[in-house]
Amino acid sequence: AAGYEWQPLERWHRVPPGLEVELDVSRAGGGSRARIPQPWQWDARISGEALVRRLAVRADSTMGQLLEQLGFSAQTHEVVWRQPNGTHACVLDCQWTAGQADLFRYANQIEVRCK
């Protein structure tokens, strides 16, 4: 799984879009590595809005800070992870960081909604 620290890349690895990649062409055996960039851009979906809003996200950005970047507060809005089929949803604690919530990996399954 992608992480915020550099991780070695092997030839057979699939690299998710959006990762920062360093290719080492000086060594025959590879030495390439990848990580989630700091910051990365999240296209936040807001319930009831047709357009997404792009936010800069760091590993230590909390859900509360992301809500503030959107002009919302944790008292009025919440960040919610939803299974792709919609059968299960979980509100993410406003103190959780993007790293703890694995926001990069699940970005397309997370939305912001009114409480």
Image (spheres, rainbow, N blue to C red):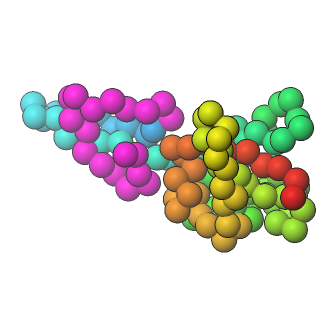
| Tally of numbered discs | 0
Q: Is residue 9 left or right of residue 62?
A: left
Tell me where residue 41 appears, x and y as whole percent. Answer: 63, 42
Q: In percent of the image, x 83 and y 31: which residue is there?
A: 51
Residue 90, compared with residue 19, is above or below; it is: below
Q: Which residues are magenta?
A: 1-18
Asked if the magenta segment contains residue 73, the reply would be: no
Q: Is residue 39 visible?
A: no
Residue 69, image quadrant: bottom right
- 16 vs 88, nearest the viewer: 88
Residue depicted at x 76% and y 39%: 45
Position of 45 compared to 102: left or right? right
Q: Work out whether 83 lies above or below 71.
A: above
Residue at 59 percent across and 64 percent down: it is 97
Measured from the top left, where is residue 26 in percent x and y? 16, 33
- Front residue of 55/101: it is 101
In the rendered structure, the answer to whether residue 65 lies left or right of residue 22 reads right
Residue 20: quarter of image: top left
User: x, y (%) of residue 76?
Assistant: 90, 62
The image shows residue 32 at horizontal and vertical percentages of: 25, 38
Looking at the image, residue 76 sits to the left or right of residue 17; the answer is right
Task: Please tell me whether the stretch drawn in magenta is mainly helix, strand or loop.
Answer: loop
